Amino acid sequence: MPTPGPPAPRTSASARAAVLSGLGTSLPPRVVTNDELAQRLDTSHDWIIERTGIARRRVAAPGTTTAALATAAGRAALASAGRSSCETVIVATTTPDRSCPATAPSVATALGLTGAAAFDVSAVCSGFVYALSVASSMIVAGLCGSVLVIGAELYSAIVDPDDRSTAIIFGDGAGAVLLERGERSAPGAVLHHDLGSDGEGRDLITVPPGERFLRMRGREVYVRAVPTMTASARRVAEAAGWRPGEIDGFVGHQANLRILQSVAKRLELPDERVIANIAEVGNTAAASIPLALASAAGQGRLARGDRLVLTAFGGGLTWGSTALLWSGARPVHQEVEPLS
Ligand code: COA
């Protein structure tokens, strides 16, 4: 007879919540600076840093897969939580290794989790926030007790190296969190979600049918991103019972530092409550929010119990926000390894 495990916590459905227990990241080792890009594109370090806040980004070596990045970040998140398994794996990505099947089953198997439920979420730069809401809802509904939510991107596969309007912005990387069943009052509790979309804007960030590379109408995206992110962050804060000024940390999708600063200004948040690591990694789409969280947590900028709002905006158009209490999880970083 197997030894029975500890009894499941007696949590009523209304008090039950998904609680963030682990945080992991993975970045390819190669750093590409603005000066390196300026050697082959009609741009400059000064233009890029002033217009975007980006100083450098990571670019994966040829042969690196999204699954490899996702697996390394997932393994790191499990290690951060002190766990070796989980019941469900969700990968949010714009750059799956194959259009069919999804990336998540390969990631689950590479993590030794064959048999786990595994699927991808496709919501471009909002993918992580969307996946977080699905994962948290699965836990609250009692469908499973633990979900690994991974945002993983290999934008170097879809960015036109000769297009200065996108090649300067995007980078590769992955970030992951482990959510486990717990209570709404616990540090780490995921409290509320706000999700939306507008398909009229589908051509603003797109890989046109039959083409290989991403095209972005940056200025048009920018002017929509600021009010939409502000409104979404406000809605989720209000649902959590927080006035905007009570948000301890605003973790926006790292698309452009000026967007983050404009949203924070509208939310009446001082600069020190804006979490930004865009200078180091650029825009990593669905990986951006967990990478920013890990960077802030690693620098000791987040305290256990802090009221955090995560807000994303991107292709689709899609947007979304999550309100959560910071858990105090210590981020773990893992180098990306090729999948065997
Ligand atoms: N280096 C130098 N000049 C550049 C350049 C580059 N890398 N990229 C564009 N330019 C030029 C343009 O050609 C344009 O020149 P023109 O005035 O002679 O026509 C000028 O700079 C201004 O271009 P514009 O696109 O209006 O710049 P911008 O200030 O809007 O900055 C982005 C461009 C892409 C950085 C900015 O629009 C942005 O961040 N958009 C939002 C992206 C986003 O949120 N995406 C969502 C998630 S992916």
Image (cartoon, rainbow, N blue to C red):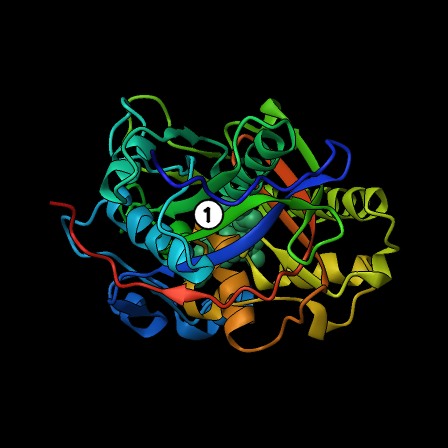
**Is the residue marked by circle 1 packed among few (<14), some (14-19), or many (20+) residues within 10 Å?**
many
In the image, what residue type sits under mark 1?
A: Ala
Q: Assess mark 1: CB under 8 A from ligand 1?
A: yes
How many numbered dots are placed on residues in this image? 1
Compared to residue 302, the image places residue 318 above or below, namely: above
Picture quadrant where residue 61 is located: bottom left
Viewer can see residue 246: yes
Q: Locate the N terminus and report the quarter of the image it occupies.
A: top left
Q: Residue furthest front?
A: 1
Residue 172 seen in the current view: no
In the picture provided, is 237 more to the left or to the right than 80? right
Residue closer to the observer: 7 or 333: 7
The residue that appears at 74% across and 34% down in the rendered structure is 12
Residue at 43%, 61% in the rendered image: 80
Measuring from the top left, give residue 158's x and y in whole percent. 30, 41
Q: Locate the C terminus and report the quarter of the image it occupies.
A: top left
Label 1: which secondary element: helix
Judging by the rendered image, the residue that carries numbered circle 1 is 285
38, above or below 91, in the image: below
